[in-house]
Image (cartoon, grey):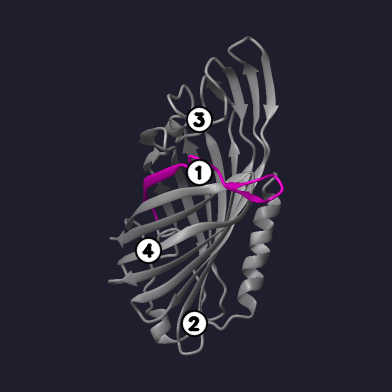
Amino acid sequence: MRYSRLLIFLAIAGAVGTASAQVAGNAAVQAQWFTGSLEAPSPALPKAGLMAIEPYVVYQGNTGTYGNDGGHHSTENNVRQMESVTVFKYGITDRLSIEALPSFAHAWNDQAKATGVGDLPVELEYRFNDENNETGFPSVTASVGMSFPIGDYDRLQTPLNGLGTGAYTLKQGLLFQSLFDTPGNHPLRLRLYGAAFERVANVGVNDLSVYGTEQGFAGHAAPGFAANVGLGAGYGLNQRWVLAFDLVQHFAYSTRIQGIDALGNSVNTREAGSAGTALAPALEYNFSDHLGIIAGIEYSVAGRNTSSYFAPQIALSWSF
């Protein structure tokens, strides 16, 4: 499949990335508490019946756009958004977990405002092995899931109402996690991850939509294949305080729009593909090995045919 090269790359990088690192044999390093990072997913839970909840509050402000050549351009009437995203994860077995990520957002600009829910991703995660801290070999978690289109995406009153995609989207992902020691017995946890997203079927579209169609349009959209890859790191200052950092890159192929507009004219267009790179430094404080808080900011540093943004956020992580 089209994402096979992405997953092969992750497998090779995960193995190579651990080869030169110092393994975590120190007892203090083994006792380190972690919450983050902000963007990296976590492995399947280690125990059946364990529950993890992580609510995020995110403010995102768009600051312009990246053109097709990668150049940055300022824009007027930029969108701002407050979003609540909550990670719910439950351990079905000691290796298999189920996760859901409901979201709710309020968006506004100088002309309009809107409130609604986003699409609902649900996935199964299976951890094939645990971290081997004697060799530095990582744990490996694979995931497969579906995003259910419950958010508004067409027949919109304003583009700000468009918080969904209308597409049933299949996701497949892979995550490597390793814990290492560093000079001074400061633990370093690394997460290398990637995911591929592909629509199950075309999306019926009517009137004003997130796909750029106008009032009176009737037809369908075919969102393109998309993927993201990232590296998340956590560096323990002491057992409670951790510096976290993410580097994330995403890309999406073009979306095709076909149908009839309000005047009866045939529409057959293809939006340009997009790509973006973002950084996300953060600071976390852990009350225990089951409870922690993390705060930081994600911001775009490069892109193509996508918006530039900054997104300060805070999250509480609790497992029980």
Q: Nearer the viewer, mark 3 or mark 4?
A: 4
Q: Which residues are magenta?
A: 65-93
Q: Is residue 181 left or right of residue 271?
A: left
Residue 15 placed where, x, y %? 64, 69
Spatial CA span between label 2 and label 3: 45 Å
The residue that disc 1 covers is 145
The residue that disc 3 covers is 166
Spatial CA span between label 1 and label 3: 16 Å
Q: Nearer the viewer, mark 4 or mark 2?
A: 4
Query: Is 264 situated above or below 286?
Result: above
Disc 1, SS: strand
Disc 2, SS: loop
The residue that disc 2 covers is 24
Give the residue drawn at x 72%, y 48%.
69
Number of callouts in the render? 4
Residue 277 placed where, x, y %? 60, 56
Give the residue drawn at x 44%, y 28%.
158
Residue 295: which disc?
Answer: 4
Q: Identify residue type, mark 3.
A: Gly
